[in-house]
Image (cartoon, rainbow, N blue to C red):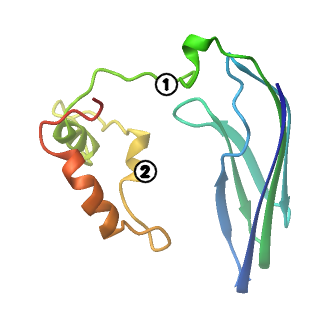
Amino acid sequence: MRISILHETRYEYSSDVEQAHHVAMLQPAALSKQQLLSHELRIEPPPEVLRTSTDENGFPRAYFEIAAPHRSLCVTAKSEVITAPQLASQAGKLDRVGVPVSQSWESVAAAMRYQAANAAGGAFSFDAAQSYLHGSPLAPIDAAFLNYVSPLASPSLPVFK
């Protein structure tokens, strides 16, 4: 199936924004069941810096910086993909996701704690998932979410079950 995708995000600010740093994950991935035919990313105002890379899971992302004062930002992504039909036995299963042998919640929490150096005195190893641990002024950790997830993240329960 041939699919055209149009995504647009607009921001309107009440005063000038002097500096803006963004990461956009709008390019569809090329997978075994999905062929990327085209992708175009338009940013207004045009960024001074635009770099593309892949994230920790191999998916495409774009980092951009705008250093000129601006009162609006518009990010538009146009893409076209062809998806292959799935076998009936594979319907509903994601192509790149498997359920791993699971650790307990407390072992995952311990692995996510910041450590300046390992026991042997070497440099610490950074897990990119740590970037999602903390809230921010615009995306705080919500008490309602904590109340919802607390019973699911009980000690000794596996993360995946």
Vertical relation: 142 (above or below) 87: below
Which residue is pictured at 76% across the width and 55% down the height? 49
Q: Quadrant of the C terminus?
A: top left
In the figure, 10 relative to 133: above or below?
A: below
Label pair 2/1, CB-CB below 8 angstroms: no
Label 2: few (<14), some (14–19) or many (≥20) C-alpha neighbours in 10 Å? few
The residue that appears at 66% across and 15% down in the rendered structure is 86
Give the residue drawn at x 76%, y 50%. 50
Q: Quadrant of the N terminus?
A: top right
Drawn side of residue 137 relative to residue 96, left or right:
left
Say the numbered circle drawn on residue 58: none
Q: Residue at x 85, y 62 (%)?
A: 46
Query: In the picture shown, does residue 133 fall above or below 84?
Result: below
Q: Position of residue 23 (x, y in %)?
A: 64, 53
Indicate which disc residue 131 carries.
2
| Label 1 SS | loop
**Label at residue 97:** 1
| Three-letter residue code for mark 2 | Ser
Residue type marked 1: Val
Left-right relation of 148 to 86? left
Q: Nearer the viewer, residue 48 or 35?
A: 35
Quarter location, residue 65: bottom right
User: Which numbered mark, 2 or 1, is in the foreground of this view?
Assistant: 1
Report x, y in % for residue 17.
70, 79
Left or right: residue 3 compared with residue 86: right
Return the x and y of residue 155 as percentages of the image width and height: 12, 43
N-terminal of the pair, mark 2 or mark 1, is 1
